[in-house]
Structures are given as C-alpha cells and as structure tokens.
Amino acid sequence: MPQYVIRRVCLIGLPLLLLTAVSLLYWFDGALLSDETHHLSPWLNAFYIISLTANIGYFTNFVAIKMLFRPYHKTLLGRQGLIPKNQPKLAKALSITLNDHFLSENDWGQYLTQSKVVHQTLNALKHKGENWLQQPENTLKLKSALIKILQNNQSTLDPLLQKIKRQTIEQQIDQLDFPLLTQQLFSWFEQQMRDNPQKMENLINPIVNTIAGNIPTIARHLIDSLDAHIESQSTLRRQIAKAARWSSNIDEEEIKAYLFRMIASQNFRETLYQGLQSIIKSCQETGSSDTETNPFIHFGQNIKPLLKELLIKKSEHLISVETLINLIKNTIKPDKLQAIAEKLFKQAINWLEHLSVSPKTQQLLNQQIVNLIQKINLKSVIESKAKNFSPQQMEHLFNVMIKDQLVFIELLGALLGGLSGLALVNLNLFFGITLLGASIYLVDNVISKKKSPHYQPEKNSSSTNFILKQD
C-alpha cells in the first residue's frame, strides 16, 4: 500500500511541480514582469530546470519498467514487452533454476525432514480416520466394502485361508505334548475314581449304551462263529453239537436276550468299572521315560496325526470366505463393527507411529516420497506452466515479487534527474552532494562485500546455474 501511494504521488506530483515551475517562470518573465521582481528570475530558472530533469529521470525509468511487460502482444511495428517476448526462454531458465537449486533430490530430502512430513501425515490420517469412523453411515459403507472385497477375491482368499488354517492346526498340534496330556488325563481319571466314585460311574453309561447298540451285530457274529466251528468238526461231533444246540434252543434271538440281560445287570457295571480302573492303574504303573514301554508315548504318537486330520476336516467349512461374509452380514452389528474398525485403526496408527520414530524408517519413507516426486519431472511441469502464463499473469507475478524495488528504481530516476538539473544550476553544490552520496555508497558496498558471500558461475554448467562461494 505505501508503494502504491508513493507511485501515485510521483505520477501526479512531479508533473504538477513542473507545470508550476513553467507557470511561474512564464508569469514572472512575461509581460507582467516588473523591475521589482526581476531578481527572482535565477531562482525560478533553477526551479524549472530541476523540476524538468526530475520528471525526465522519473518517467524514463517508469516507461522502461512498463516496457518490460507492455505491449503484451506484438504490435504492427513489431514492438512487444521484453518479458512477454522472451517468455519461453524465461520459462526454461526458471524451470532449470528451480529444479537444480531448489527442487533437487537432496533439497527434497532436506525439506521433508525439516517439515516432519511423515509425522504430520500420520497425525492428519489419524484425525481424518477417527472422524470418518465415528459417522454411522460410514460404518455401513465399511461393511458393504468389506463384503464386496471378500466376494470379489473369494477364489484367491479361500485357498489362502485353508492353507493358513492347516498350518495353524499343525503347528498347534505339534506344540502339544500328547504323552504328558495323556498321562495327566489318566491321572485325573484315577483321582476322580478315588475321590468321586459315584460321579465317575456315569462314565460307564456311554460304554454300556454303546455295547447295547451293537448287541445285534455281536449276536450275529457269535452265531456265525458257532456255526462255523460246528461245521469244522468231524461228522459224529458235528451231529452231537447240532443236537445239543437244538436241545438247548441256542439261536440269535436267545443270545441277544442273554447279552441284554448281562449288560443290564449291576455285576456287569461293577466289572466294567473295575476293569477301567485296572487299565488306568496299569497305565500309571507302566508309565516311564522309556519310549519302548511307555504307553502314553505310543498313544500320543498314534493320536497326533489322527487329531490333525480330524480338526482340518471338521474346520473345512468353518473357516472360509463365505463364513466371513455371513459373519459380517448376519452376526456383527454396526456398532460392534465400528468398535472393531476403530480398534484396528488405532492399533495400525500406533504401529506406524512406533515405526516412524526410527530415523532409518523416516529416511526410507522420505526417500520413497522423493523417488515419486522425481518421476513427475517437475522441470517440464514448471516450464510448461510458465510458458502458458498470460502476459498479465507474468506482470502480476513480477509486481508481487519486486514491486518495492520497482518503485525504488522510479524514485532513483527522479533523484538522479534532479541531481543532473542541479548540475546545470550550481555545479559546486552538485559536486558536493554527489561526492557525499558516492562516499556513502562506496563505504556501504565495501563493508557489505566483506561480510557477505557472493555468487560465481559453476564450472561445467549452464549459464543459469550458480553456486554460493565464500569470498
């Protein structure tokens, strides 16, 4: 705003100052000039000369600055602003300078490290993700998306799930100590038989029921075995055995009735219970570290592969993509799914934050971002963008960057013009002011050069490339 005011004041004030000088000079040197005012002529003449040269200096720089941009387009006589005329060259130089000195791989790595882009990205992701998951409608979108992903990838996921399931079951089974588990199971049975005999008698019922269900088959096998044995005897013995069987009325139904009466008796249950107790006690007594005689080791070795196949077969339809889809559709409610999603999202963010703390990880992530940026070819993008700027945009861009300096150049022109006019009026005063200004400039220039570095062209590079070197 101050620069705008200064420029307006100069554009209006300097011409008015010149107009005033011309008017006064004409008034006092004209027909109305009297002898009493004749002594004012030298001062009016000096005022006129300085005003004229100040206007010339100011408007010369003003027009020169305008000619950098105006006219925007080539006129009939071929006139065009310097910057619009050389816009393609400027665009190429700008792209090379920015790409080589501000957007190189090392510069991007430094920018990303200083700005902590990984940390800021995670914070933004955490904030956005939490807000998104808290919206009920987004939970339904998440549910539909999960189902759609599972359906579209079912042919790939099903074999993978079965492989994971099989490996998991095999690993878990292999980690179990079956001999030890078997020994602990028998020890538990022995203790229960000793401490809770009434309760453990209930174990007999499943065995009795199993035997009862197989009595018809047992009876059939007994009759078949008896007939085969009789037929294998000599003729006399065979006839005697058949007569004894006929007289005793031994047939399949009679045997079934006998077996049913036997297993229903209390004596059978007691005998069975005592036999089970005897087996457990015998296993406990023979259990040792010797693999040749330890029954638990043999039992564990035999049951392990069977248990693996049983669990794998029984879980075949239990773990599948279709099971997961039905679980998401029918079992998991929206609020439960939201809680699961929030928990998983939080764990993922915590894991990423913990991972990003490592300087090595940050460097790796920054390098990946730099690689992506380098693939964009920013030099071509900048050059194309700069070429497509309109002349008005270019002028506005330069005014934004150097408008303060442009006003200073215009004022400097007015000052130098005024000094040149002063030289025509009073040479001694001109030399005094000029010498004072030149002394101040030289002292400032020498001190500044000693304190600050200067730029020199870099060898084996284009004219737009410079490196900073200490004087």
Image (cartoon, rainbow, N blue to C red):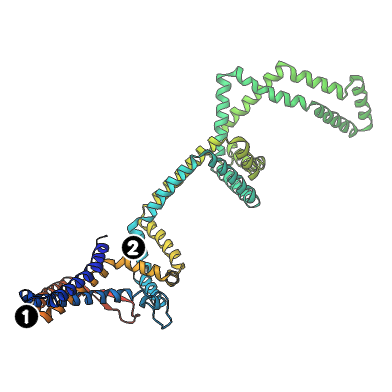
Label 2 crowding class (10 Å Cα cut-off): few <14, some 14-19, many 20+? Answer: few
Sequence order check, earlier mark of 1 and 2: 2
Residue displayed at 27% across by 60% down: 1
Secondary element at tag 2: helix
Query: Which quadrant, please, contains the C terminus?
Result: bottom left
Query: Where does label 2 land, which residue?
Result: 110
Secondary element at tag 1: helix
Quadrant hosting residue 327 = top right
On the image, the x and y values in percent for residue 86 come to 39, 78
Query: Where does label 1 land, which residue?
Result: 428
Judged left or right of residue 45, residue 317 is right
- Per the model, the C-alpha gap separating discs 1 and 2 is 58 Å
Between 243 and 103, the one nearer to me in the picture = 103
Judged left or right of residue 8, residue 434 is left
On the image, the x and y values in percent for residue 215 come to 79, 26
Residue displayed at 12% across by 81% down: 424
Between 256 and 11, the one nearer to me in the picture = 11
Quadrant hosting residue 26 = bottom left
Q: Is residue 141 above or below residue 106?
A: above
